[in-house]
Image (cartoon, coloured by chain):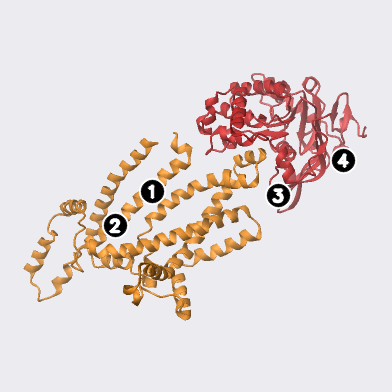
Chain colours: A orange, B red
């Protein structure tokens, strides 16, 4: 088991190098760079632009630039943004926090609601409870997250029960620690609930189908033939097997922390990474894009790593090969 | 007294086209310490008979009529709570593919221990599992193994141990050797024979292999189209098969194959329960077909010590 974990952790390192290298090449593929726009300005001389390119190291081959970049990353220097002229790490710090808060909040809520509902629906399969829930889930899947967000924003605007947009109210600076937390949470509710509502449907369906599949497995017949109670058949024999594929899904969910919320963030005006990344890509702000790709990549890889390790704990067929 | 007595059992399954009867008028009894073989082609209702006795039928399937007496008590009338005590207690079951009938995520020991009834003390339960593991010819250390770490034969031994841990009166073995190779199958049969005597358990041995059934069982019931068409003593059935279907089954055995011959099979197909022919279900494949066979279903009839459903032996109902 320990060897398996060490092996899996070591695999992560080349994966991150490869991933950053390829994305570095790809974002340099389109013609032009952040200074191309300046060439149109007659007031700026060619020499100045050349000098700036040299200053930022853009005159060197892409591969060399990559190694400069990766060297800086190891000293926690993610480079400077071309559009904002401030360090990338400074730029993304607060926005990253907001995005992570939003994603973690909605992922937790989504799982907390859809897993029990999925199990319940699987047990009630074919009865009206299951049909009703599946119908609702079907509607939930077909409505895109940003549309749900718009509906919620509209509803809140009419009733004024929650603050809309931003992360803090005017009185935030004078508030105590606990009040600050509550205020932040209130602002988090609109985007958080939008994301949750959009995610419940598909996760519910996955859980329901997993559980149903396990419920039809031969070992469930064995468990019944032993004379076990239905609660043991469901919550011990079936659930322990039905939860395994969900662990893998959970790993992928973690990788979506950064980008999964982008649309909802823009619609509900939540100051997260979504809009920042979008604008960075459009203006070819290389280092800002690379920083978000790096974080996204690390999240994806560690998400899968955690899932693989959890699966090894949950499934002896993986653990004891 | 008989351990098990099934009387006029009828089971039907609900489909989109309406109710389809899959077991019709099944009568079968199993005596104390007796092995009864239940033989027939796939899809003739053997497993459904077994599942009816456990009252573990699929959701859309139910018992319409009949009685199943377990040591004199009719279990058809019993509710789920009472059945839970009987399952794994008085009746237990082993299955065709032990690899998929064992839960992959729990140790085999804990799966046996879970089945132990009537012992509260944790250490005593554990001791009980160790004892049964040794009885089925496995080492104590197997307790901590997971199913995927064991061979098919060992897995089936675990299943047998799990089934016998509460000393049941009846063991239903649903094709327990079909998924195993011939040597392992032989060992499992020998183990069942040994345990049958030490545990004083009766066995309903379900198989499609009539020669294996003759080797292991005292009596053999042959099933066709959801009905038992013949019940004979196993020493009689090879010498003197009564029902035309039994006769054809024995004629088709690979042991009777001579080099150069065409491989024999019963002509025609196993009938679908939705479109059983009128009269005797075997009549389209029967070489002795008479006019009456298409008109009426034959009743059970005693011929010597055997029971048969065939108009060859007259068409009046006896006893």
Identify whether B139 is placed above or below B23: above
Q: Is residue B35 left or right of residue A7?
A: right
The residue to which callout 1 is attached is A304
Give the residue drawn at x 52%, y 39%.
Answer: B105
Q: Are marks 1 and 4 on the same chain?
A: no
Frontmost of labels 2 and 4 is 2
The residue to which callout 4 is attached is B296
- Looking at the image, the residue that sits furthest to the bottom is A158
Frontmost of labels 4 and 3 is 3
Q: Are marks 3 and 2 on the same chain?
A: no
- The C terminus of chain B lies in quadrant: top right
The residue to which callout 2 is attached is A293
Q: Are marks 1 and 2 on the same chain?
A: yes
Give the structural element (helix, strand or loop) at label 3.
loop
Label 3 Cα neighbours within 10 Å, binned few <14 / some 14-19 / many ≥20: few
Q: CA distance from mark 3 to mark 1?
A: 41 Å
Residue B73 falls in which quadrant of the image? top right
Q: Say whether disc 4 or disc 3 marks the residue closer to the N-terminus.
A: 3
Frontmost of labels 1 and 4 is 1
Q: Say whether disc 1 or disc 2 marks the residue closer to the N-terminus.
A: 2
The residue to which callout 3 is attached is B60
Give the residue drawn at x 63%, y 33%.
Answer: B96
Chain of the residue that carries numbered disc 2 in the rendered image: A
Give the residue drawn at x 56%, y 64%.
Answer: A136
Label 2 Cα neighbours within 10 Å, binned few <14 / some 14-19 / many ≥20: some
Residue A287 at what x, y percent from top left?
22, 60
Give the structural element (helix, strand or loop) at label 4.
loop
Residue A182 at what x, y percent from top left?
41, 69
């Amino acid at each position: 088991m320990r060897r398996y974990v060490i092996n899996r952790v070591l695999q992560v390192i080349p994966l991150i190098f490869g991933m950053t290298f390829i994305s570095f090449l790809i974002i340099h593929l389109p013609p032009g760079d952040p200074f191309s726009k300046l060439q149109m300005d007659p007031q700026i001389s060619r020499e100045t632009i050349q000098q700036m390119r040299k200053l930022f190291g853009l005159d060197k081959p892409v591969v060399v630039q990559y190694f400069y970049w990766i060297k800086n990353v190891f000293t926690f220097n993610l480079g400077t943004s071309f559009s904002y002229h401030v360090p990338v790490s400074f730029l993304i710090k607060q926005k990253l926090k907001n995005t992570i808060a939003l994603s973690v909040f909605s992922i937790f809520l989504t799982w907390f609601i859809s897993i029990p509902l999925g199990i319940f629906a699987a047990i009630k399969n074919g009865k009206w409870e299951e049909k009703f829930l599946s119908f609702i889930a079907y509607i939930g899947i077909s409505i895109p997250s940003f549309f749900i967000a718009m509906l919620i924003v509209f509803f809140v605007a009419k009733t004024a029960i929650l603050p809309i947009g931003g992360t803090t109210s005017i009185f935030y600076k004078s508030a105590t620690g606990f009040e600050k937390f509550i205020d932040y949470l209130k602002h988090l509710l609109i985007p958080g609930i939008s994301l949750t509502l959009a995610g419940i449907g598909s996760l519910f369906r996955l859980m329901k189908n997993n559980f149903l599949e396990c419920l039809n497995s031969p070992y469930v017949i064995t468990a019944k033939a032993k004379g076990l109670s239905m609660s043991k058949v469901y919550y011990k024999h079936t659930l322990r097997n039905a939860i395994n594929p969900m662990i893998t899904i959970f790993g992928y969910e973690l990788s979506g922390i950064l980008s999964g919320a982008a649309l909802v963030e823009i619609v509900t005006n939540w100051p997260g990474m979504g809009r920042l990344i979008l604008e960075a890509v459009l203006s070819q702000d290389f280092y800002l894009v690379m920083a978000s790709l790096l974080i996204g990549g690390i999240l994806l890889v560690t998400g899968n790593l955690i899932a693989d390790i959890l699966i090894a704990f949950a499934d002896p067929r993986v653990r004891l090969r | 007294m008989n351990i098990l007595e099934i009387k006029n059992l009828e089971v039907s399954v609900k489909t989109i086209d309406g109710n389809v009867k899959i077991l019709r008028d099944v009568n079968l009894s199993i005596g104390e310490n007796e092995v009864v073989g239940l033989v027939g082609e796939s899809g003739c209702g053997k497993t459904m008979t077994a599942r009816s006795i456990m009252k573990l039928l699929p959701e859309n399937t139910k018992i319409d009529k009949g009685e199943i007496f377990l040591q004199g008590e009719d279990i058809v009338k019993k509710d789920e709570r009472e059945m839970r005590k009987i399952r794994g207690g008085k009746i237990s079951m082993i299955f065709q593919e032990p690899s998929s009938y064992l839960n992959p995520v729990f140790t085999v020991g804990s799966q046996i221990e879970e089945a132990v009834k009537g012992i509260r003390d944790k250490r005593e339960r554990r001791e009980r599992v160790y004892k049964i593991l040794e009885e089925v010819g496995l080492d104590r250390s197997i307790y901590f193994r997971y199913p995927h770490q064991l061979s098919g034969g060992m897995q089936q031994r675990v299943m047998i141990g799990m089934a016998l841990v509460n000393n049941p009166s009846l063991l239903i073995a649903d094709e327990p050797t079909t998924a195993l190779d011939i040597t392992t199958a032989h060992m499992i049969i020998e183990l069942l024979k040994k345990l049958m005597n030490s545990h004083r358990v009766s066995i309903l041995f379900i198989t499609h292999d009539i020669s294996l059934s003759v080797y292991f069982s005292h009596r053999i019931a042959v099933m066709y189209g959801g009905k038992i068409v013949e019940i004979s003593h196993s020493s009689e059935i090879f010498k003197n098969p009564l029902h035309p279907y039994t006769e054809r089954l024995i004629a088709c055995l690979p042991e009777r194959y001579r080099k150069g011959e065409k491989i024999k099979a019963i002509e025609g197909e196993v009938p679908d329960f939705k479109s059983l022919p009128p009269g005797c279900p075997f009549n389209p494949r029967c070489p002795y077909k008479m006019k009456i066979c298409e008109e009426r279903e034959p009743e059970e009839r005693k011929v010597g010590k055997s029971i048969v459903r065939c108009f060859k032996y007259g068409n009046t109902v006896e006893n």
